[in-house]
Image (cartoon, rainbow, N blue to C red):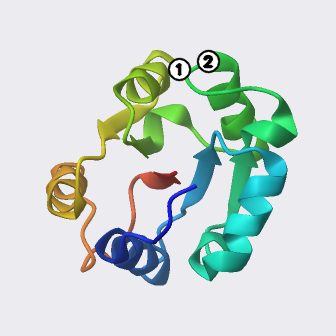
């Protein structure tokens, strides 16, 4: 578990949620560890929901976890953008039919989002942003 939050990245997620984007999370955390992280970092409770590997007994980049998440949150993979710092997980999401970008920092993420037409000024979202841990 990381010892701190990435403030700029949290601000991006909070901005997406405030602007009406559908943000969900898909994480490889253990169930109990993720619940502790939510207590330490309340922003982890802001998205519409989360699929936790420890709860569903699947782990990224297994295609089954992407399908499980899409079904649980009624997501159209072709209209979903997946963000993750692991290249293997990004490739797994792409193999499951999702759009996906590799997180390398807040500035790159802003550019990646803009490439998909996702900007704070957008009033009518066209893609669901699935924020990742």
Q: Which residue is mark 2?
A: 63
Q: Which mark is residue 96?
A: 1
Identified at 46% across, 15% down, the residue is 95
Q: Which mark is residue 21?
A: none
Q: Earlier in the sequence, mark 2 or mark 1?
A: 2
Query: How crowded is the residue under tag 2: few (<14 C-alpha within 10 Å), some, or many (20+)?
Result: some
11 lies above or below 1: below
Task: Find residue 19 and report its image quarter.
Answer: bottom left
Dot 2: what SS? helix
Foreground residue among 33 and 121: 33
Foreground residue among 88 and 75: 88
Query: How crowded is the residue under tag 1: few (<14 C-alpha within 10 Å), some, or many (20+)?
Result: some
Q: Position of residue 79 (x, y in %)?
A: 45, 41
Task: Find residue 37 and report its image quarter.
Answer: bottom right
**Name of the residue lying farthest toward the front:** 3
Q: Position of residue 2 (x, y in %)?
A: 50, 59
4 on left or right of 39: left
Identified at 76% across, 67% down, the residue is 36
Q: Position of residue 44 (x, y in %)?
A: 62, 70
Task: Find residue 6 and report its image quarter.
Answer: bottom left
81 lies above or below 118: above
Foreground residue among 55 and 25: 55
Dot 1: what SS? loop
Do callouts 2 and 1 mark residues in contact (Cβ within 8 Å)? yes
99 on left or right of 60: left
Q: Indicate which label's residue lies in the foreground, 2 or 1.
A: 2
51 lies above or below 1: above
Quarter holding the N terminus?
Answer: bottom right
């Amino acid at each position: 578990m990381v010892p701190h939050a990435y403030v700029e990245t949290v601000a991006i997620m909070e901005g997406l949620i405030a602007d009406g984007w559908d943000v969900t999370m898909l994480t490889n955390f253990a169930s109990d560890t993720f619940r502790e992280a939510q207590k330490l970092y309340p922003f982890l409770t802001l998205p519409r929901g989360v699929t936790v590997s420890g709860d569903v007994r699947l782990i990224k980049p297994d295609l089954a976890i992407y399908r499980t998440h899409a079904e649980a949150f009624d997501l159209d993979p072709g209209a979903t953008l997946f963000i993750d710092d692991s290249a293997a997980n990004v490739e797994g999401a792409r193999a499951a039919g999702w759009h996906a970008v590799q997180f390398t920092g807040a500035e790159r993420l802003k550019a990646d989002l803009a490439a998909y037409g996702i900007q704070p000024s957008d009033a009518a979202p066209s893609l669901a942003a699935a924020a990742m841990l």
